[in-house]
Image: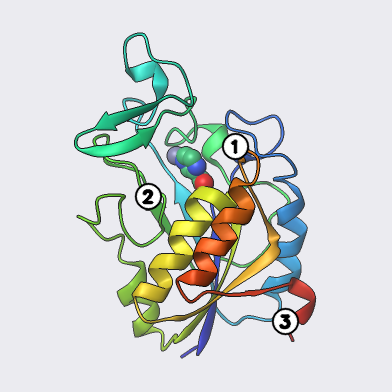
Amino acid sequence: MADKALILVDLQNDFCPGGALAVAGGDQTIAVANRVARHFDLVVATQDWHPADHGSFAANHDGAEPYQVIDLHGLQQVLWPVHCVQDSPGAAFHDRLTAPIAKVFAKGTDPTVDSYSGFWDNGKRKATGLAPWLREQGVRTVYVLGLATDYCVKFTAIDACGEGFATLLVADGCRAVDLTAGDGERAIDDMRASGVVVVESSQIA
Ligand code: VGL
Ligand code: ZN
């Protein structure tokens, strides 16, 4: 049994410099993850894991450009460059990530709906199984870090609160896409408003 768990969000090559959807400084989260993980008996990871025909890819919509917003089966969807395609090198975890991961939760596998949260798809129709799995391990508190602050980290942390876990965000272990300047800071405000406690990795004992 483990009272607390660390959730590593999407520490994948495509979100790091040189990747298909590179986040500035994304690779700087890896050392933080490795360091913080030493304080946990239980570490889990989410993995963005899209089929090539995924509806969040601009390339799969005639005439569309990345970062345009469309309606995808009833939900607002930012269109992204092709990224994290199942079994591609871009979908692999960063090779400096050494934290011992007990279980990986794949998300974004349904081509019809995106999944920013590690718990639910964006329509909250289908769960990944992360919440019941954590409960089975005895977890009541989760710490969250990873990529990207304004998308998958934000929705994973907010859903963790919604699932009843005490939730802490390790802020220096996250980086934002920042499509619009300030998105990362606004995401942190949104998380706080949902009950997430924001900490720095140096505060974790
Ligand atoms: C993410 C955009 C698209 C993320 C995943 O991990 O934050 N962002 N897919
Ligand atoms: Zn994605």
Which residue does the image show at 50% across and 62% down from the upper left?
A: 190
Q: Could you tell which of marks 2 and 1 lies nearer the N-terminus?
A: 2
Camera-side residue of 127 and 124: 124
- Residue matched to label 2: 107
Residue annotated with mark 1: 180
Q: Is residue 54 left or right of residue 30?
A: left
Which residue carries the number 3 mark?
204
Of callouts 3 and 2, which one flags the residue occurring earlier in the amino acid sequence? Answer: 2
Name which quarter of the figure residue 90 lies in.
Answer: top right
Q: Is residue 192 visible?
A: yes
Residue 11 can be seen, yes or no? no
Residue 62, by quadrant, is: top left
Image quadrant where residue 119 sits: bottom left
Q: Spatial distance from mark 1 to mark 3, Cα to Cα? A: 31 Å
* Residue 65 position (above or below residue 140): above
**The residue under label 1 is which amino acid type?**
Thr
> Which quadrant of the rendered structure holds the C terminus?
bottom right
In depth, the one of 18 and 93 nearer the eye is 18
Give yes or no for contact between labels 1 and 3 (Cβ–Cβ under 8 Å).
no
Provide residue 152's location: percent of width, then percent of height.
48, 52
Instruction: From the top left corner, tell me how far across and down residue 52 is, in percent.
Output: 36, 26
Number of the front mark, 3 or 2:
3
* Residue 177 appears left or right of 76: right
Q: Position of residue 112 (x, y in %)?
A: 23, 35
For numbered disc 2, what is the local secondary structure?
Answer: strand
Disc on the earlier residue, 1 or 3: 1
Q: Is residue 81 above or below residue 36?
A: above
Q: Residue at x 36, y 68 (%)?
A: 130
Against 144, residue 167 (above or below) is below
Mark 1, secondary structure of its residue: loop
